[in-house]
Image (cartoon, helix red, strand yellow):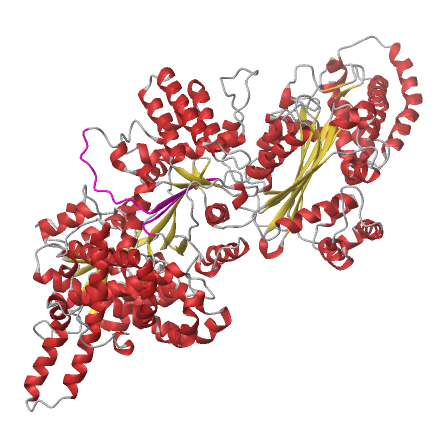
Amino acid sequence: RTPPYGPVAQARLAPTMHGLRSVSKAGVTAARTAAAGARRGRTLATKTRGIAKGQGAASRGQAAAASIPARNLSTVMDNKKSWVEQRSDLKDTARKAIVYELLQNANAVAEALVPWFTDNMPASYFRQVTPQMQKEILRNLIAIYDHETDSFGSDTQEGDTKQLVLQSSVGDTRMMTFINYSGNQQGLLRSQLEQIPAGVGELARLKVFTSVDERLCVNMYSFEKPGAQGSITKGEGALSLAAGQHILSFAEDLKTSNGDAGLPWSPLFESASLTAHIENSPADYVKNSSPRSFLQQMILFNDVSGTELDGVHCEFPDPDLPGMYYAGLDEFETGDLMGRIVEGEEFGRHWCLKVALTNAVPQTALYKILTAFNSRGLNVMRLHLDKVDDGANGHVTQVRLLFQEPETKGDMADYLSSLERDIKRLKWVNDSTINLSMRKERGENTDCSEVGLQRAEIIMCLKSMLHPILSKKDPWAFSRTNISSVVENERYMRHATGIADLFASRFDPAAPLGDARYEAWKETLRQEIDDDVEEFLAANVLHKMIDVVDMTFRTNLFLKNRYALALRLDPAVFNPNDTAAADADPTDWDSPFGVFFVHGRRFNGFHVRFRDIARGGMRLVTPPTEEQLSIESARHFDECYGLAFAQQLKNKDIPEGGSKCVVLIDPISNNQVMTGSERELVLRKSVKAFTDAMLDLIVDRDDTTPYIVDKLGRQELVYLGPDEQVIPDDINWIVKRAEERGYPIPSAFMSSKPDSGFNHKTYGVTSEGVQVFLDTALKNRGMHPLIHRGSPDDEAVTLKITGGTDGDVAGNMILILDREYGDRVKIVGMADGTAGAEDPDGLDMAELVRLVKSDLPLAEFDQSKLSAEGVIHDVSTLAGLRARNTMHNRVVADAFIPAGGRPNTVNIDNWDSFLLPDGTPSSPLVVEGANLFITHEARQKLFEEAGVEIVKDSSANKCGVICSSYEIMSSMLLSDDEFHAVKDELVGDVLDKLRELARMEAELLFREFNNQPGALPHFSERISNAINRITDAITQHLDTPEGEARMPELMHLVKGHLPKKLESEAWDRFESQVPPQYVKNAVASTLASRIVYREGIRFVEDRGEDARPEAAHKLARLAFDYLEAEGTVSNMLAMLESSNWGDDAAKETALKMITHGGVRSFLEGGFANNKVGSKPDEDIAA
């Protein structure tokens, strides 16, 4: 038969399929007899009566058989041998004797097994398991039960082999029933979860039944087949409602009595909301839940719905409170059966736990819960798991279980509080952290305490942070593996746990460690390490762990509902000069303003910022192999630091400084890269966990501040933006979560909101700036596509691009190039994650545009549109992968636009691959649309050796972050409705501003490059540094009383910086709705960029590099004098313009001279303090 198998087939198949040992032949034969009766449709009782009726006939056969000489049975049965006696009466007699023997045995088995089974299996088993399945389970038990010894199976069977596994499939549901007869051994459920084969589907329901004497466990797992999610979890409407009438009646009684012990009345229990919840729940879940249990789980469901939180409720069944008794035990039982477990002294040893898990993988989540129980020695007696649909939010896994109270526990309230905290954390920690938590603090001696989950999480967090720090000292010695081997080594476990205890005690809000005690404890730990640890690697790791504790300002360790472990750190801990090898040259290192580190399940994340108020994108890095993961881990902080520093350089035009967030995610499971929904789940959860943990440390609320010991002493604002692999759903969730957490101006926390923001990909904001720099660079080289370079037959400008047609920067570059230049440009090479494409005649632009507008990758290029020499490289082949990876080096083009790809693709070790065999570059011009595609050293080499002109990323792609800044200003000033009402016009104004700011820098960049020696990246950095230097000086001055008093006369600067539509709609509310520090930064950055773009970098550099406060004050004074000079010169020009010189040519010359040199003459001539002219005219200055 198709599964469920009959007892004979199952008895034979189960050992083969599941590694179980074979049952005895007698048992199989008895099972065949029992199965025959069941197949004739008899009930168990009828079958027993049938066996008794057969005894009479069998006894007559027994008498006849006694007079026949004993023969070998094979001889009797073999009628094909010539020497066999042909006697039919002998056959009949033997047959009857065998039947009698088997009937006697089956009768004895049934008489012994059935009463035991009905007495010992809980009432919930008979209520919740279908009669058909009950019979199937009994048939299989009969096959392995020995009535003479009153035991199941063979004495030689051990552990997991003492079980049968039944499998069945109905529609989109698969079931596995484990019948275990080893005794209710601890860890049994966990062991069974490990045996479930891959690909069976997602666990959606689990029912656990244990016999009263704990000899038998029947555990029934139900799975939704792959691709059939919802087949079990979906609500069943009227069917569910019909099954839930007992719950509605109970709720009415509860309302009348205004609640009972442990379950107060809640508005959630009103008929309408309760009915809706019942209809949305699976009928089986509703039917098999006690009313009180269902309502308690409904409260948990409501608490976690739409969040990523987990809810836990634990209670003790008190015999003196009927309601509590009902809540504690009747959710699993009805009637008197359960009383046998809990009567007398045994009653107080059972507790009921309910857990609501949001969007968890049920099998994985349950495995973790059982691991926690196993580590504490807790024995699960009953367990039900049900997966319930939560609409657009996903699903909630409801678990309720009954467990025995441990013998050694201390205060039970503290014990349960610790258990609840750990269960909430399980979803968010790595398996390695859970495993470490169960290790013994000093070896494997059972008398020693376990590490515990909190200490394990601290240790793993510190370990993860150390790799990018210590790898600078020696990347081979301080590998991920070697660092792990230290903190997880029994030899050093006591030191690691001691450091974890120091960290926890320092930041324990209930009793924070005082400075004196902290310093004494820290020095004691260091001394113990020096005395006990001789190995160089281990000593360095442990001491650096203490350094991290010492340089931590804040942590969310003690927040109740945190998603990950977050630390606000002193940037000094990352100074490479402190960890570099002794013979290494000192590194020129600019310290960031602040660093956050977040450690969570399958990810680590850094956030680095170079100003108090800073903005930068969040990117997700997902290495495809373990080896690549280790490489990315070693350079994790450096990548984040480098991107943040580049952002600081490119943010020169806006109020926010530079920052960056890099979340390194481990997408590898069972040595294979995750794909599809599994991979998406990990990425989306990592984004949520990282951002929520960041919010823990920067929001000031009653649910955060009391639980954080603050060593920093000031509140902080952080602004994020999207980058690689961050999707619109992430952005929406982050903004919503920031609002829920009480972040000031939550819409400003994350830019590029799909509905209320300027989507970078939709409007191509970054690419608009890249095109301006490309246009200026081509013009400077005499290669502009729209200007003939000698004859009407000039060929089109050729380009090569990395990045996909479905990507932001590369895709929009295609559209803008087609818009601006038409057939005067040809893209001769492209490469993305899916393919490489090359065509010396130019890839068909119409086909590229089609892919962009259809959001399709390069692999979808219609190859019929290629020329005879064109080719598409398939990355699934080794040759195609190699060709794709080298396209940017091999293909010859007038200009190269890296618009996608990993940082450091072109570096000091491979820069010469960009050159052709004759030493000339494959492209003489590079405009960096992607960040850090070429390293600083490689840029310099390409310029010095081959004259390659490279427009650095901090200039070329700056418009993306400027757009984000305008979006944030809009979100501060406009409601969603106001924004949508003017969005189209506002977008046009923003794009105009972006092109204007790009054009001003591009023209200054090439003006400086043409007039002074040096490479383009060098001038790009000098422009940024000059602007940032003035910005910082002005900001410092505005923080003084004198600066505060000056603010009103400077507000026109910000007004002129705003897009026209935003200024006209909301200028009157600017000062009241924008944070004061943000306003000051806006004033400073606007004035600073204006000065440098007009006067050049030497205007600032000639003042020297003095870092003293008085030097900054002088620079700020110069900026304000410049503003005064502008006003005076503008008024003077107006007067000259209106005067009559009689010589128009001379007048025009004079006006130009004053326009270009008047401000400098004013400043250098000492007129600034003479009050010449008037205050700057607001309209002219703006």
Instruction: Decide: is 195 above or below 1028.
Output: above
Q: Is residue 596 magenta?
A: yes
Q: Position of residue 56 (x, y in %)?
A: 94, 21
| Residue 748 lies in quadrant | bottom left
Residue range corresponding to the magenta coloring: 583-611
Q: Residue at x 30, y 69 (%)?
A: 1053
Front residue of 697 and 341: 697
Q: Is residue 161 visible?
A: yes
Q: In the picture provided, is 1066 more to the left or to the right than 13?
A: left
User: Is the residue 768 above or below the residue 191 in the image?
Assistant: below
Residue drawn at (37%, 42%), measured in percent from left and top?
623
Q: Is residue 897 visible?
A: no
Q: Nearer the viewer, residue 101 or 325?
A: 325
Image quarter (top left, top right, bottom left or bottom right) of the N terminus: top right
Residue 1141: which quarter of the image? bottom left
Depth check: give the residue in front, 1137 or 410: 1137
Percent coordinates x, y for residue 613 in the rendering: 37, 55
Q: Quadrant of residue 536?
A: top left
